[in-house]
Amino acid sequence: MQVLTKAEAIEWLSWSDKFPDGNHDYAHCDGKDLFFTHPEANCIDLEYPPKLERLPFFARLLAAIGYEDKDFEGALLWFREWGVWNSHDEAMGYRIVEMMHRAAGQPASFEVGPGHLFRGDEFQDAVAMLLQPMVFGFDAYYLPKWSYGTGQFFLFVSHDSFVSIVTRTSEFYERAFSVLKELNLSPKPGNELRLRRFCRTPMQTG
């Protein structure tokens, strides 16, 4: 794992914006949010499972939704916002993340190192970090890479206890929605607010 500053995380997430004509096959970053510009982009909203012991399964499933673990080639997880709730409760999450930084030989504070770049052999590490915003109520983005089909989805974890799976194509949306429904996770189509935020036309971004 490589710990990144906010500026480094945004730089990594913004690489696709360097194409002169844009690129609809990858997620874009405007410095605050990730979004797709593909005309079929859509969202699936999920609330957390009611039983706490299901949360690790939930995080692991979403981290590789539509793929197999063996095809994981890395991911960027960026803590976008924190401090929304009780600071004493959130402080436990800060300490856990900082201990993960130290274990990786990069003792950056939570605030200095909100970005986390994972290698292809660090899928379990990425899932462990993805659990932190779910448990402690941070906003976070998770953008994975795969050995094929990279660019099909990213996750937005909200401090309001839900996750949005943002999909690039209709085919992937239907496939992910079907898997989630079969597992009784009660997926819902993304609401209008999320669609405007994460699924933008080129005109909206210009």
Image (cartoon, rainbow, N blue to C red):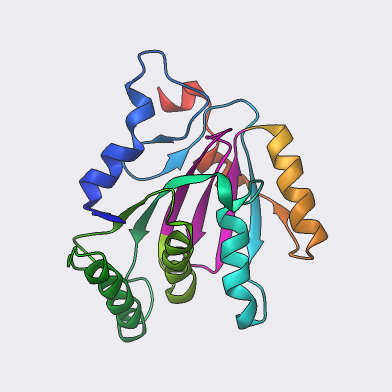
Q: Is residue 100 above or below residue 11?
A: below
On whether residue 149 falls in the magenta region, the answer is yes
Is residue 125 shown left or right of residue 167?
Answer: left
| Range covered by the magenta-colored residues | 140-168
Question: Percent from the top left, x then y, of residue 34?
Answer: 43, 41
Q: Where, quadrant-wise, is the N terminus in this rendering?
A: bottom left
Q: Residue at x 75, y 43 (%)?
A: 175
Q: Is residue 20 above or below residue 142?
A: above
Q: Main secondary structure of the magenta part?
A: strand
Question: 43 or 72: nearer the eye?
Answer: 72
- Observer able to see residue 193: no
Question: Percent from the top left, x then y, of residue 23?
Answer: 46, 21
Is residue 138 shown left or right of residue 101?
Answer: right
Q: Where, quadrant-wise, is the C terminus in this rendering?
A: top left
Q: Residue at x 73, y 34 (%)?
A: 171
On whether residue 119 falls in the magenta region, the answer is no
Question: Percent from the top left, x then y, of residue 3?
Answer: 25, 56
Question: 78 or 149: nearer the eye?
Answer: 149
Question: 4 or 79: nearer the eye?
Answer: 4
